Amino acid sequence: MRAIFKFRVRVVLMVVVGIAVLIAGRLYVVQVVHGTRYSERAKQQFSAAGQSGLFDRGSIYFTTKDGTHVSAATLATGYLVAINPRLLADPTAAYDAISAVATTTLSKSAFLAAAANKNLVYVEVAHELSTAAGQRLAAENITGVEVLPERWRWYPGGSLATKTIGVVGYGTGSTLIGQSGLEEEYDPVLERSGGDLLGNFFAMLFSGAGSTLVSAQGAREGDVVTTIEPEVESRLMDDVAAMNAKHSSHSSGGIIMDPKTGAIIALATYPTYNPNNLSNVNPQLLENPLVSHVYEFGSIMKAVTMASGLSSGAISATSTYDDTGCFHVDGDRICNWNYHAYGVIPMKVIIMQSLNLGASWIAEQLGHTRMRDYFTKLFGTKTGIDLPNEATALLGNLSKPQQIYYDTASFGEGVAVTPIEMIRAEAAIANGGVLVTPHVVSSIVSQSGQTKELTWASGTRVFTRQATRETASMMNDLFSQVLYNGKYNIPGIPVSMKTGTAQLPTPTGTYYNNRFFDDEVVFFPSYNPRFIILLYTEDPKNAIYGTDTITPPMIDLIHFLINYYGITPAMAGTAS
């Protein structure tokens, strides 16, 4: 009996000690790890009755090529300034003191009007003061002026990937929520539920004791880690902006993606904005045209048409046709870009010389049903990219009975797709025939430090492997032999390319004769691709063809990526 009693005492003692250790550990986390956060909340709640506490939100990170996380969106800490009109003895002197440290211009008339309203006891007059500025103002100890801790959203990279990262803004009431980009798409992960300090204290204290003590909201909160490489993103943004400036274009954009996984390494558009200062930003700039706008891409669609024809068996790589330069279909005339008749030629010349007649001939061999099926698989549904407001392609012409609509669609006219849809379709040629899911986020890091790797839908096969190899080979011949007579050929590293130039559509459904949309797509190494790049520029003013507007920055990007990632001929693979 005595032995049993001693055993029970020891068990109880061990349980008590275990609970004590658990409480001590959680107290350390609460008081030391998160101590500053709770201290600042308490200060503001006691100083400003009715305030909801400091703004809190998860972070967003870029990922460098070596796996290091770099802050893309975080919280800045400083001070706000509030006045109590009932206690303010000298409003003009207070205004001068606050204006001296304010980060934005403070309206004197509005300040004095607020100071004169003695019915108020708390009016916020300045925000986002640096720590030094706030402490300097607080040291003046002006009666009726309160300097309180504040946190706000801060984007350390400024405009770097801003349309992808997004911004926060006020939703209903006074709650800050994600308004665009990843801030909007992952708002349920990034938002912080807040709650009273006592509740948060005990939730943190006993979160290790059982899942029933942790809210569902807290379980899904975390930081977002992206696949965007900041050095590559910076380079792409610079090149897109320079291209747009050089040609006085309406807009320009680009995407760099891993064609095998769909992981997006960089994406950029111009014009853009700085998310740290939204005061004069046109709300339309918050849109990301790479996912929300559709364009007629022109001749880069010929690679898709070629892969469709080869994959279906409607044609083979050794098929030939008689190119007459122009021909009539359904009362309309279709011509090659240079009106040249090439005679009886093999399929690869269609890609190498970008022949409209050749693409039209493939469309006719495919027939309406098969061509519609391929284009619907490629462009008929959203890509599933983890960014908001994704648009879908306009494929209405492929529901019509006339052959002319299939012929023009074969070379990228009369059908409009988003840039992200287009690069995904071209990536299926690069990766052996599979439609991957483009994505920007790789993982979520919970507040407890645990990392959850995100999984994306496995690719759907749309082309045969042989068809993609043959198409990639044709695109490689274009780059290595035809493009400036092989001037940019890279020994040991084959590059596959397709260029495009399309007339811009008018509001009435016709086409401008002097306004164009230029674009190019490349992937490399051709037979073991590491990257696929899509660049475009809309309405360039001093050039017509993509080889003039797009090729120079594209070549620079290819060499940059080869050098930055150390791609060697040993990594290139073979065409077989």
Image (cartoon, grey):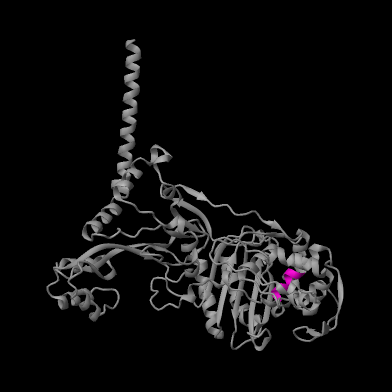
Q: Could you say which quadrant of the image residue 106 lies in?
A: bottom left
Image location (x, y in percent) of residue 423: 64, 67
Q: Is residue 239 visible?
A: yes
Does residue 140 appear to the left or right of 331 in the view shown?
A: left
Does residue 515 appear to the left or right of 111 in the view shown?
A: right
Image quadrant holding the N terminus, namely top left
Image quadrant holding the C terminus, namely bottom right
Q: Could you say which quadrant of the image residue 58 lies in?
A: bottom left
Image location (x, y in percent) of residue 227: 53, 60
Q: Is residue 493 visible?
A: no
Which residue corresponds to the image point at 66% horizontal and 77% vertical from the top-left?
296
Which residue corresponds to the image point at 38% horizontal and 54% vertical from the top-left?
193
Q: Residue furthest left?
A: 89
Image location (x, y in percent) of residue 333: 80, 85
Does residue 571 appear to the left or right of 332 in the view shown?
A: left
Looking at the rendering, the stretch of residues picked out in magenta corresponds to 299-305
* Numbered circles on residues, count: 0
Magenta segment, prevailing SS (helix, strand or loop): helix
Q: Nearer the viewer, residue 291 or 468?
A: 291
Image location (x, y in percent) of residue 546: 65, 80
Q: Nearer the viewer, residue 551 or 54?
A: 54
Q: Residue furthest top?
A: 1
Does residue 183 appear to the left or right of 498 in the view shown?
A: left
Whether residue 245 is in magenta: the answer is no
Q: Could you say which quadrant of the image residue 313 lies in?
A: bottom right
Q: Nearer the viewer, residue 405 or 501?
A: 405
